[in-house]
Image (cartoon, grey):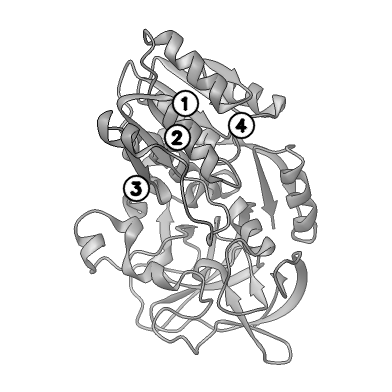
Amino acid sequence: MKTRGAVIRQAPGKYEVVNLELDDPRQGELRVRMVASGLCHSDDHVATGDIPVGVYPFAGGHEGGGIVDAVGPNTPGFAEGDKVVFSFLPGCGRCRWCATGHQNLCDLGAGLLAGARWNDPTSYRLHLEDGSPVGQMCGISTFCEYTTVAVDSAVKVAEDTPLEKACLLGCSVGTGWGSAVNTGEVRPGDTVIVAGVGGIGANAVQGAAHAGAANVIAVDPVAFKREAAESLGATHTVASIPEAGELARSFTNGQGADVAIVTIGVTKGEHVAEAFSGVRKQGTVVVTGLGNVTEVGLPIAISELTLLEKKLKGSLFGSSNPSADIPRLLELYRAGHLKLDELVTTEYSLDEVARGYEDMHAGKNIRGVIRY
């Protein structure tokens, strides 16, 4: 069928909306009519070239929800009309990582940026009208009015789920909340620094507060984001990580934060180093943000790592198991323990996707959402 979607033709580049040809679903696949998609910074990293992809043009979007429009043959478990939230990380359920409760590290993730079907690097679900292949971001491309995806990427949710809010569970909410609760293992009474309060960091603030942290220090140079962080559970806000470190030490008799979570949109080595200086002995630094994937090196003292037993941990999708955690977070939202409505700052049409990213760079949004 024909659909419309936002693609980049080269990197650096900007998203433009074009007409596309979309495959019908094969066995193990679904065609989904999109309802909403979050505008995540990772898709901007693809546009800037910080994250290279396997083929251009490349259709963006990896955080979204929609309604099943067609089910591939011999594909049990789904029916037309089902509501689904996508997990940007697929889960096969069979590899070592899925089998040991680490679905976020599923081996299928190796194909996230290739743009093709997991099992055939020459097979693409999207094409331009002239037949040229178009890659799919994370195998789902939520910046399309309709998309065809593997069932590995779809989590069925209740019929009354508000997808314009629940779409955020497919990346930003689970990534931020899980960075605090799962990866950081925040405990009641802890002092926590969250550096960067955008779509991910806002949910790290929620997660830290939900876990019982006594002090949640949100860091962002943008005043609007600091104010938003206070409404999401931050007890204190500052403009820089060194300020946060000083504040944490003032709360802890000079020791420092128990956990520091780095969720800055374009994360640099110096950001990690500043967070590392801000935690106590045996403190934990969780690095969730991404920058240029070719950059290497962290300016931290090896002696500080060794002698103070500080811990440095990466976090992918908040170390979560999306098939279980997306429904769990949705229940927390229904119970009033997790805020989703407050995360959506501005809604855009598909044709306004480029403006949405301009607003993100200008610091105007916690999360922008495309409504179809």
Give the total of numbered labels. Answer: 4
Helix, strand or loop at mark 3: helix
Q: CA distance from mark 1 to mark 3?
A: 18 Å
Marks 4, 3: nearer the viewer? 3
Horizontal side of 241 relative to 182 (left or right) equals right
Q: Earlier in the sequence, mark 1 or mark 3?
A: 1
In this view, 30 is above or below 131: above
Give the residue at x 48% y 47%.
169
Q: CA distance from mark 2 to mark 1?
A: 6 Å
Q: Position of residue 67 (x, y in %)?
A: 54, 62
> Is disc 2 in contact with disc 1, using a CB cutoff of under 8 Å?
yes
Q: Position of residue 367 (x, y in %)?
A: 64, 42
Helix, strand or loop at mark 2: strand
Give the residue at x 55% y 82%.
125
> Is disc 3 in contact with disc 2, using a CB cutoff of under 8 Å?
no
Helix, strand or loop at mark 1: strand
Q: Earlier in the sequence, mark 2 or mark 1?
A: 1
Helix, strand or loop at mark 4: helix
Q: Which residue is mark 3?
A: 319
Disc 2 residue type (three-letter): Ile
The quadrant the C terminus occupies is bottom right
Marks 3, 2: nearer the viewer? 2
Q: CA distance from mark 3 to mark 2?
A: 13 Å
Q: Earlier in the sequence, mark 4 or mark 2?
A: 2
Q: Which residue is mark 4?
A: 342
Q: Kindly tell me whether residue 337 is visible in this rendering.
A: no
Q: Residues within 10 Å of mark 1 (few under 14, many from 20)?
A: many
